[in-house]
Amino acid sequence: MSQRTKFVLDEERIPRTWYNIVADLPVPPPPPLHPGTGLPLGPDDLAPLFPMALILQEVSTDRYIEIPDPIRDAYQLYRPSPVYRAHRLEKALDTPAHIYYKYEGVSPGGSHKPNTAFAQAWFNKNEGVKRLATETGAGQWGTSLAIAGALYGLEVKVYMVRASYDQKPYRRMLMEVYGSEVVASPSPTTEYGRRVLAATPDSPGSLGMAISEAVEDAATRDDTKYSLGSVLNHVLLHQTVIGQEAIEQMAMAGEEPDVVIACAGGGSNFAGMAFPWLGRKLRGTGTPRIVAVEPEAAPSMTRGVYTYDFGDTARLTPMVKMHTLGHDFIPEPIHAGGLRYHGMAPLVSLVKDLGLIEARAVHQNPTFEAGVLFARTEAILPAPESNHAIRVAIDEALEAREEGTPRVILFNLSGHGHFDLSSYERYLSGALQDFEYPAERVRAALAALPVVGG
């Protein structure tokens, strides 16, 4: 069969709850710590940055949290998203594996990010917030929050990592079309940004730096809250609509995945796809292997340490226990800007530490090779971040071919690459560079980890 098979749910099948994996974990997550005192955080400590509804989600242990109807209504702009079986890709690989992918690029922002952007904007608006400050790496998150700000009448300020700001001008323009203000980070508009620029005028920036600027912005204005596109528990929670839909769609296909794959930078699209499947596994239903794929240039899970660290470079955020390369570490300017983060979501880090998931790191040239093959067979241009998941899905399919055994593979195609054509141009011309693991720089960054507890 050469056609692509599509599995679609109707709008009534949009999940009515978000799934919280904390309820099914064998151990409780380590608490976040106050950046000043080192003591566990309470809800009041987070109130300057987040609305109370999101704070309660952040600390919840309930298995399911109801999705308010206005958010489900907004989800109907693009959800449920389709699952496809990649027959053409299977044929090109001459594999007995069955390859399926959940395509989140159908959203208005072109990625999975509106799943939490719409939710965060609505909860902020509902509590009277007027303005949001945020960071963005590749621009997918910034675009999604800009759209959400336009829908809910919120002012949005986006600190876009300098490397991506320069690589992806059309992402910046799109955010501005939706009414958001976008500045390159590090920027001259915050005290921290000015400090970085004074020391390193040509800094490529990092997600850690951009987070510092956005947090400073929110903390110094009474009308502003901070909005984060990944890492935190409530962000991962909102993304679980992906995996919940995929479970129903794979049932429609009549197959159970042997392996579930997603790329991982901060952890949101990975958790969104993987956590509902992992929850079933923890409750005794299904046995898929679950694989997180990260870039070799920022390999927090495969080369980092699992310990308490700051989520940003200025040490303004709470300390969380996560896989980290050190908050001072600045990854090389790879084109998968959404994966250029020194750490990993605490919940993703915990399930990795417990041995419940696998992690692999890959270089960017092999990921683009996979993305080009995928585009030429499935007619969808993937985002550079998503190429990481495609690379490992292809590797799994080739392994099934070598073994001569069937294998059902499901991966999350987290977004399209329509604004990333400059990176494809560099790959096709042979100019794309692979960055070796910077062991010395990581060692130096890890030396600055905070000392926690006694």
Image (cartoon, rainbow, N blue to C red):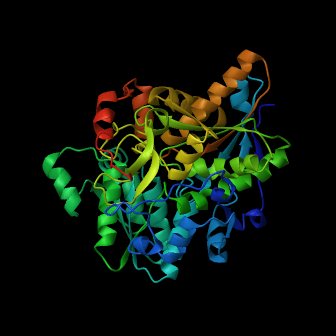
Image position, residue 317 (x, y; %)? 36, 60
Identify the residue at horizontal 61%, vertical 44% (top origin): 413
Left or right, 213 with respect to 41, comes to left
Residue reaching furthest to the left: 198
Residue found at the far front of this picture: 454
Question: Where does the N terminus fall, quadrant-wise?
Answer: top right
Which one is in front, 181 or 376?
Answer: 181
Q: Residue at x 72, y 55 (%)?
A: 244
Please give the count of numbered marks on the rendered protein: 0
* Visible residue check, residue 11: yes
Q: Considering only vertical position in the picture, is 257 above or below 153?
A: above
Q: Please state the horizontal and vertical placement of residue 399, each as a whole percent of the image.
A: 68, 21
Q: Is residue 28 above or below residue 264?
A: below
Q: Toward which corner of the image does residue 195 lie, by quadrant?
A: bottom left
**Residue closest to the eye, 407 or 441:** 441
Residue 298 sits in quarter = top left
